[in-house]
Image (spheres, rainbow, N blue to C red):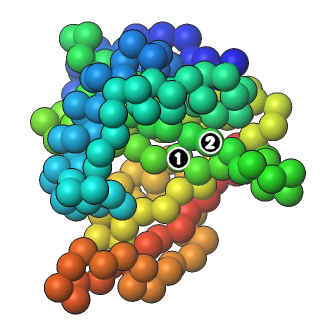
């Protein structure tokens, strides 16, 4: 079972944050965070109009990560409220099972306070202890300069760019930057 022991850490702004594995009981709070971040209509693959996740589906998604030793969902809690989320899953085929990708969301009100760095470092630490995982990957919108800066600071390198990969609407295209880091 993929698990991360709850850890109290100080963010770069000096705020105490708890980083821990998600549980099924977090489904509602994770949905609330996801709705808020997706509702911003930027930097997410899913648009607000297509986000229809239910509590039951969220619980199943969390359970699928809890039962797979090579998947993990981490949450950042501030004053017992989930304000950050990072999920990682390795490849399902033998030749790519040593690598995986993550997605991360941080509530707008607490961005720039170091919560993303804490979540990402927790993932890197977890992956380093995992016997299977050798590489962590991600895809990020090229207009999300703040996220790209964080990933580079944390040791990720640009491995490629998929041109005009995303269409925000009305002819507004965005490239996808593919990044990776060996554990």
Residue 153 seen in render: no
Residue 106 higher or lower than 68, as above or below: below
Q: Residue at x 50, y 38 (%)?
A: 87
Query: Badge 1: few (under 14), some or many (20 or more) residues near its Cα, within 10 Å?
Result: some
State the image coordinates of residue 47 (x, y, percent, origin top left).
26, 59
State the image coordinates of residue 128 (x, y, percent, origin top left).
71, 33
What residue sits right under mark 2 in the picture?
89
Q: Which mark is residue 77?
A: none
Query: Badge 2: few (under 14), some or many (20 or more) residues near its Cα, within 10 Å?
Result: many
Q: How many marks?
A: 2
Of label 2 and label 1, which has the lower sequence position? 2
How far is the residue under mark 2 from the one under mark 1?
7 Å
Instruction: Please report contact status of discs 2 and 1: CB closer than 8 Å, yes or no.
Output: yes
Dot 1 falls on a residue whose secondary structure is strand
In-image side of 43 versus 109 (left or right)? right
In-image side of 132 versus 88 (left or right)? right
In-image side of 88 versus 114 (left or right)? right
State the image coordinates of residue 141 (x, y, percent, origin top left).
36, 67
Q: Residue at x 53, y 68 (%)?
A: 178
Q: Residue at x 49, y 62 (%)?
A: 139
Dot 2 falls on a residue whose secondary structure is strand
What residue sits right under mark 1 in the picture?
102
State the image coordinates of residue 59 (x, y, percent, origin top left).
45, 24
Q: Residue at x 36, y 61 (%)?
A: 45
Residue 48 higher or lower than 35, as above or below: below
Q: Which corner quadrant of the image does residue 144 belong to?
A: bottom left
């Amino acid at each position: 079972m993929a698990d991360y022991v709850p850890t109290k850490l100080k963010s770069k702004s000096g705020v105490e944050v708890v980083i821990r594995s998600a549980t099924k009981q977090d489904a509602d709070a994770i949905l609330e965070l996801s709705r808020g971040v997706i509702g911003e209509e930027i930097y997410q693959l899913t648009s607000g109009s297509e986000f229809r996740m239910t509590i039951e589906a969220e619980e199943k998604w969390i359970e699928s990560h809890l039962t797979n030793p090579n998947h993990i969902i981490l949450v950042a809690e501030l004053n017992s409220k989930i304000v950050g989320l990072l999920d990682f899953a390795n490849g399902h085929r033998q030749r790519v099972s040593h690598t995986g990708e993550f997605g991360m969301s941080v509530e707008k009100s607490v961005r720039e306070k170091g919560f993303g760095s804490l979540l990402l470092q927790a993932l890197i630490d977890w992956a380093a202890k995992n016997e299977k995982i050798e590489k962590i990957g991600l895809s990020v919108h090229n207009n999300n300069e703040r996220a790209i800066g964080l990933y580079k600071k944390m040791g990720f390198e640009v491995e490629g760019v998929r041109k005009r990969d995303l269409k925000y609407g009305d002819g507004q295209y965005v490239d996808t930057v593919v990044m990776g880091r060996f554990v």
